Image (cartoon, grey):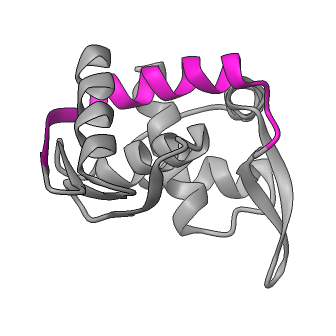
Amino acid sequence: MKSHRHRKILELIEANEAETQEELQSLLRENGFAVTQATVSRDIRELGLVKAQSSKGYKYAVNQNRDSAEMSIKFHAVFTEAVTSIDSAENIVVIRCYIGMANAACAALDSIKWKDVVGTIAGDDTIFCVMRDKAAALDFVGQLRKLI
């Protein structure tokens, strides 16, 4: 349950400008997660979220400067529960996810900052990763498959 909630939090902060814990709690409740403010506070700490500048002021965001070991753990938790298959075509890696989970998995993937990933884009259940070349794509697929 906790990992599902963490995935949803990552998805929500990417799609919304939650400025307070109460706003994030409300968004979670709207998405079927009955949580207390204390739980939201703990989740924010565990995910390493920070307040970042937004168009309206400040919002919760993923801390881009977190310790890489901690990011790796969070990435692994989100990614392994979201992904159903991984394949490649030339320099493009296609990652299939359970419906509604691609955005959270993509945010987790982006937080790792893989060296040969040129860019990513996520839909509802699919992530496209553009790699530097075909060899990098094949290597990336191998690394990701080991995770799942």
Q: Nearer the viewer, residue 110 or 36?
A: 110
Residue 99 rendering spot, x and y as whole percentages: 17, 50
For the C terminus, the image quarter is top left
Q: Is residue 142 visible?
A: yes
76 part of magenta stretch: yes
Residue 52 rendering spot, x and y as whole percentages: 84, 61
Q: Which residues are magenta?
A: 65-88
The answer to which quarter of the image holds residue 78 is top left
Residue 119 rendering spot, x and y as whole percentages: 45, 63
Residue 47 rendering spot, x and y as whole percentages: 67, 31
The structure residue drawn at horizontal position 30% and vertical position 51%, both measured from the top left corner, is 102
The structure residue drawn at horizontal position 38% and vertical position 55%, both measured from the top left corner, is 103
In the figure, is residue 77 to the left or right of 110? left
144 part of magenta stretch: no
- Residue 12 position (above or below residue 139): below
- Residue 69 position (above or below residue 110): above
- Looking at the image, the residue that sits furthest to the bottom is 55
